[in-house]
Image (spheres, helix red, strand yellow):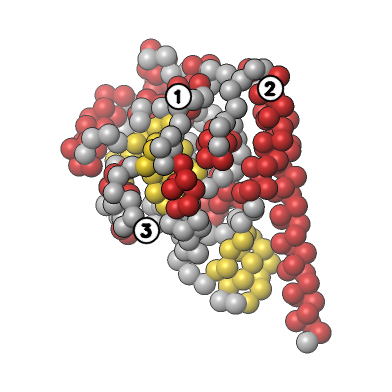
Amino acid sequence: MYKSFYVENCNQLIRRLMYAQNKLGTDLWYRGQNQACFTLIPGIYRYALTTHIHGNPVRPRLANFRSGGGEFIRFPDQTQLLNSFKNIWAKELSALHYQKPGNDLEWLQFAQHYGLPTYLLDWTTDPLVALFFAIDGVNTNKPLYSLDEEEKDESEPRDCCSIWIINPKSVNKVIPEINDVLDANKDSKKILRLMKNEIFFCFTASKNNPRVSRQSGNFVAFGGSPYRWSMDFLTLMQKEIIKINIPYTAIPKIREELKIFGQTSPNIYPDKQMFNEDKVKLAYQKVLNDFTETIEKNYQEEKNMDLYS
């Protein structure tokens, strides 16, 4: 099991961050999540559906990436999602004279930071940015339990947010072909190729976008391996992970402390007012809806075939 701690203020957090450096090494990456019971899965996993268990069709339900076996899982098509995203954003960027991504990997990174569900999981080199995302959107009077049960680890507390910590070099050493953290600027072709095969690996993001740059963003890419799990589920990864839980009761004080360091929404999202992100979301939402409808239709057809066989 990975090592986990509780902290209730920034001073305690600093001490645990120092412990993480002593334990995992330097050049660490951090990820904030506003519920401690949420696991380390990318956005596209939240729409994946289980269609068969041990070869038998079942009514489609959200996939469980901590079950470890027996499930056949279908995912939305990332290429279709990205194309629908591109069609809208290309026009938005042109109108604003905004620099367009230069290749498929840059588009994918850009899309991830502007809401598209992808196989990428966001991390940052700045622990204060991770802390902002951990407490962002949490109503301490009404805790968030909005996402589906399959995303949750029921062994974790429901009244906390969390910061996850990894050493990206240690994560990548698990993959024989990768000796170090890959660089999106230099290794784009290799990264896209590895995403078709490997379970997950780390790469540094292109910093040619103000949002990615301000958030000191990097990524863990979840690949196309037939074996799909949450990152924190695998035993070989757990020794490379540290988790810090923050009780919701501590958030009001921490929010005030964060403001001193300039960690506010306008600062974290410097270009938020430039784009109509809701309009873009509607475009790719159709792809997600079509995916769900197709899976449900396939289930009904298989069910009918069983009835009349």
Category of crowding for the residue at label 3, using alpha-carbon neighbours closer than 10 angstroms: few (below 14), some (14–19), many (at least 20): few
Q: Disc 1 marks which residue?
A: 213
- Residue 45 visible in the shown view: yes
Q: Position of residue 185 (x, y in %)?
A: 43, 34
Q: Is residue 286 left or right of residue 112?
A: right
- Give the answer, above or below, for where 276 lies relative to 104: above
Of badges 2 and 1, the one in the foreground is 2
Q: Is residue 13 left or right of residue 293?
A: left
Q: Position of residue 89 (x, y in %)?
A: 67, 30
Which badge, 2 or 1, is on the more N-terminal residue?
Answer: 2
- Give the answer, above or below, for where 263 lies relative to 81: above
Near-viewer residue (167 or 96): 96
- Residue type at the position of mark 2: Ser
Residue at the image position 67 percent from the left and 63 percent from the top: 60
Residue at the image position 72 percent from the left and 27 percent from the top: 91
Residue 234 badge: 3
Which badge, 2 or 3, is on the more N-terminal residue?
Answer: 2
Near-viewer residue (116 or 53): 116
Q: Disc 2 marks which residue?
A: 94
- Give the answer, above or below, for where 78 lies relative to 244: below
Q: Position of residue 148 (x, y in %)?
A: 58, 50
- Residue type at the position of mark 3: Leu
User: Tag 1's secondary structure?
Assistant: helix
Of badges 2 and 3, the one in the foreground is 2
Near-viewer residue (284 or 32): 284
